[in-house]
Amino acid sequence: MTVTCAIRYVIDPFKCQAFETYAKNWLTIIPACGGDLLGYFMPHEGTNNIAHALISFESLAAYEAYRARLRTDPAGRANFEFAERERFILSEERTWLRPVTN
């Protein structure tokens, strides 16, 4: 069964450009490490400090393998370090979803 990780980010609204750079970096890193990236989504209207990402995996075991690859991937590590250095992510929550099927 496919599972989707829905990530809700609370970001510094004065550092949206930095978060967008971070998100764009993941567009190639996540697929290269085995995730099926459905997209990153930036605030547009209304709330200015909430962003989202959706990433699907074949299973939770596939997610765990992906996480292991991500930790050793040079580009992935660099993007995590960028986020820590710039401090544009205030918090994040992960929710696991499954598709509704017949």
Image (spheres, rainbow, N blue to C red):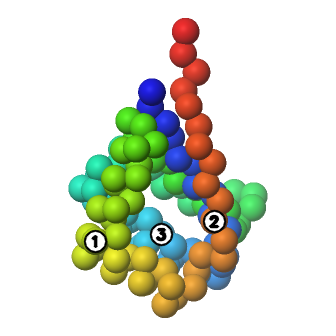
The answer to whether any part of residue 56 appears in the image is no
10 Å neighbourhood of mark 3: few (<14), some, or many (≥20)? some
**Which residue lies under the disc numbered 3?**
20
**Is 81 situated above or below 27?**
below
Looking at the rendering, in which quadrant would you find the N terminus?
Answer: top left
**Which residue lies under the disc numbered 2?**
92
| Residue type (three-letter) at the residue carrying disc 1 | Thr
Disc 2 element:
strand
Disc 1 element:
helix
**Which x, y percent locates residue 66?**
34, 54
Q: In the image shown, does 24 or 89 lie closer to the viewer?
A: 89
Name the mark on residue 72.
1
| Residue type (three-letter) at the residue carrying disc 2 | Glu
Name the mark on residue 82.
none
First in sequence: mark 2 vs mark 1: 1
* Distance between mark 2 and mark 3 Cα atoms: 15 Å
**Pointer 2 and pointer 3: residues touching (CB < 8 Å)?**
no
Q: In percent of the image, x 58 and y 21: which residue is there? A: 100
**Is 11 situated above or below 8?**
below
Q: In percent of the image, x 26 and y 70: which residue is there? A: 73
**Is 69 situated above or below 22?**
above
Mark 2 vs mark 1, foreground winner is: 1
Q: In which quarter of the image is residue 13?
A: bottom right
Q: In the image shown, does 51 or 30 lie closer to the viewer?
A: 30
**Pointer 3 and pointer 1: residues touching (CB < 8 Å)?**
no
| Left or right of residue 100, residue 26 in this image | left
Mark 2 vs mark 3, foreground winner is: 2
* Distance between mark 3 and mark 1 Cα atoms: 23 Å
